[in-house]
Amino acid sequence: MSNTQAIGTPPGSTLSTPSPTELHDQDPLAAEAEKSMLFKTSSLKPIYLVVATTKCTHQGRTRLGIGFKGGLPWPMIKADMAYFRKVTTNGKSNHSASASRNSVIMGRKTYESIPDKFRPLTGRTNIIVTRSDQQALAERIVKELRTGSHKQLTEEVDIVISSDPNNNTVQVEASSIEEKLPNIVVTSSLTSATNMADAETYCIGGSEIYGMFLKDTLLRPRLRILQTEIQKLEDEEVFECDTFWPEELEGSSEWQEAEQKEVVAWTGIEVPQGGDQWAVDEKVGVRIRVRGWERSAR
Ligand SMILES: NC(=O)c1ccc[n+]([C@@H]2O[C@H](COP(=O)([O-])OP(=O)(O)OC[C@H]3O[C@@H](n4cnc5c(N)ncnc54)[C@H](OP(=O)(O)O)[C@@H]3O)[C@@H](O)[C@H]2O)c1
């Protein structure tokens, strides 16, 4: 990859808050304080877990299925895809293309489950969490940018991979401010993932990563859930699933359902398939609707 290079700590970028290392080259304690202050500031904003679920029985228990054999349990549902794209790209957005973008945080397996032609996700900062070699994953993603659906957009563009060991992040940055070109961050740390996020933050799965957010005592109070419920039109039929949403939602004392108007206000995006309104996809044989959940006041 001739125009890809690894360099040291990156200069300040539009992707992230300034690195504490840059701010306090000489003073690690001050840098740590700055880091924690940045984290506290960002902790005021909600983080949305965006998930599509279908009820299924697993080991004798009713569960919310989200995946099967590394992909989704159902064929592509256009209305769900359109809602996902709108919310994660434009949700609450009044930001310009080059300044701040919404972020989608996902596990490495979810990244790899996205069909080649859709990944990385256009117009958003894709933050991918992995315990494996971050540089190698970033290099693979650059290759995908050069050869996949972003090929034309990246033809005349320099793409640089830079690492920031203090933040456990590797970033892929393109020299173009083309609106559709995604920003990429690869990280091993949930804190870095949430601190890197610029505008709105959407965690898009999968099960392991939802579980990390739900278990994190600092993040948990900030969470809201945007759930697309999926049911087969033939009521007695279900989709086969092997990957599940980690918790109970319905009937849980931890979560309460938000009114539809609140759900619309969260993102500024209309929900055509919200509340009692189910959208029907005859081709796939499903009905879907969106529900919002927030932490229970109890
Ligand atoms: N229905 C939906 O809305 C929805 C949404 C998203 C995904 N899905 C489905 O869910 C399935 C994938 O979910 P999954 O739970 O298997 O995988 P995942 O959460 O997408 O990714 C798991 C990977 O994340 C990394 N990881 C996990 N914990 C980590 C930690 N503490 N620190 C650093 N990295 C960590 C590891 O990557 P490395 O192995 O690289 O170290 C791990 O293998 C697929 O079937 C997908 O289609 C469904």
Image (cartoon, helix red, strand yellow):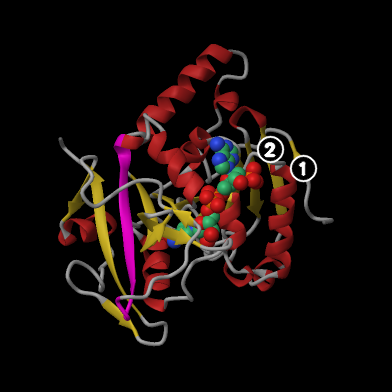
Residue appearing at x 48%, y 76% in the figure: 75
Disc with the residue nearer the chain's start (1 vs 2): 1
Q: Is mark 1 on a helix, strand or loop?
A: strand
Q: What stretch is highlighted in magenta?
A: 221-235
Name the outermost residue toward the right: 2
Left or right of 183: which side holds 89?
left
* Residue under numbered circle 2: 163
231 falls in the magenta region: yes
Residue appearing at x 30%, y 35% in the figure: 221
Image quarter of the N terminus: bottom right
Of 234 and 102, which appears nearest the observer? 234
Residue 7 quadrant: top right
Coordinates of residue 200 in the picture (x, y in percent):
38, 49
Of 233 and 29, which appears nearest the observer? 233
Name the amino acid, label 2. Answer: Ser
Res 6 label: 1
Residue 83 quadrant: bottom left
